[in-house]
Amino acid sequence: MANGALKHTLHWGPMQFPVYFHVFGLSLHPHAVMELLGYTLGFQFYLLLRRQQIQPTLPVEKNLWIIVGAVFGALAGSKLLAWAESPLEYATVFGTPAMLGGKTIVGGLLGGWAGVEIAKKRLGVTQSTGDLFVFPLALGICIGRIGCFLTGLDDHTYGTFTSVPWAVNFGDGPRHPTQLYEIAFVALLAIILATRCKLAYTNGRTFRLFLGGYLLFRFGVEFLKPSYKPYLGLSMIQIASLLGAIVAFRPRRRAVG
C-alpha cells in the first residue's frame, strides 16, 4: 500500500483523519468548516459584547476602521510568519497558487494588533479597544483548532511522536495532540480572565494578559512540534511569540490594545 493511502486509512479509534462532515450529500473538509464557524461565531460574540458594554464605545465609523486594520493586519501577519516559519517549503512554490496557502495564528494575532495600533494612531484614538476582542478570539481559536485536529496530518499542527496515554494516531503513529492542548489552554485562560475581569472594561489589561499568555504557551508548545527550528533550536513562531509576549507584558504609560 502506498504511503499516501496508508496515511488516510489508519485511524484513532473510530475516527479516520481527516474527519469530513457529510451534509446534504456533500463532504465538507473539517478545516474549512471549523475555520468559517470560528470566524462567524467569534464575530457575533464580539457584536454581542459590544452591545452590552456599559462604558462609552467608539463611534461606529472609527470602530469599523479599527476592525479593518485588525483584519488586514491579521491577514498579512499570518501569511508573513507562515512563510518565515517554512521558508524552504514556500521557496519551492514561489509565484504559484500554493503561496496563498499557509497561515499561523501567532502571525495573525501580532499582525492584527499592529494593524489596530496603526489605525488608532491615524484616527487619533487613545483609548484601548482590545478587551472586547479577548473572549471572541478565545472562542474562535478553540473552534478553529478543532478543525486543525480533525484535519490530522494534512494540517501540520500535530505534535512529535510520543508514548503518553493520551497520544493520538493521526495515521503514522502516536503523537502529541497539540491542537487539543491549545484548546484546553485557551479555554482555561479565558475562564480565568472572565472570572477576574468579569467582562469589565480594563483599559487593555485583559487583552494584554490574554495575548501575552497565549504567546508564552505557543513558545512552549512548539517544542512538542516537529517544526523547522534553525535559530538556536527555536522556530520563527517561537521567536515571534517570545518577542510579542515581552511587548504585551511590558508596563505601559498609555492604553495599548
Image (cartoon, rainbow, N blue to C red):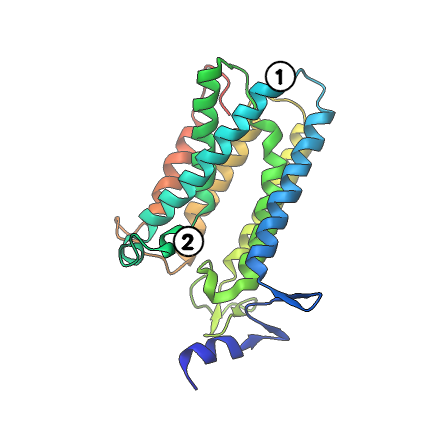
Residue 207's spot in the image, x, y percent?
A: 55, 30
Residue type highlighted by circle 1:
Pro
Dot 1 crowding, Cα within 10 Å, few <14, some 14–19, many 20+: few
Write down the residue under mark 2.
Answer: 101
Provide the secondary structure element on which disc 2 rests: loop
Relative to the observer, which residue lies in front, 210 or 38?
Answer: 38
Is 224 located above or below residue 242 in the figure?
below
> For residue 199, which quarter of the picture?
top right
Name the residue: 31% across, 49% down: 234
Relative to the observer, which residue lies in front, 210 or 52?
Answer: 52
Write down the residue under mark 1.
Answer: 59
Q: Is residue 129 found left or right of 77 in the rendered image?
A: right
Residue 28's spot in the image, x, y percent?
A: 61, 63
Residue 14's spot in the image, x, y percent?
A: 64, 75
Q: Is residue 240 found left or right of 178 in the rendered image?
A: left
Residue type highlighted by circle 2:
Gly
Q: Locate the N terminus and report the quarter of the image it occupies.
A: bottom left
Relative to the observer, which residue lies in front, 216 or 116?
Answer: 116
Q: Is residue 129 visible?
A: yes
Name the residue: 58% across, 29% down: 206
Q: Is residue 198 visible?
A: no
Q: Which of marks 2 and 1 is nearer the N terminus?
A: 1
The dot on residue 50 is none
> For residue 33, which quarter of the picture?
bottom right
CB atoms of marks 2 and 1 within 8 Å? no
Residue 103's spot in the image, x, y percent?
A: 43, 49
Is 26 located above or below residue 251 in the figure?
below
Is 131 located above or below residue 19 in the figure?
above
Provide the secondary structure element on which disc 1 rests: loop
Is 93 located above or below residue 162 in the figure?
above
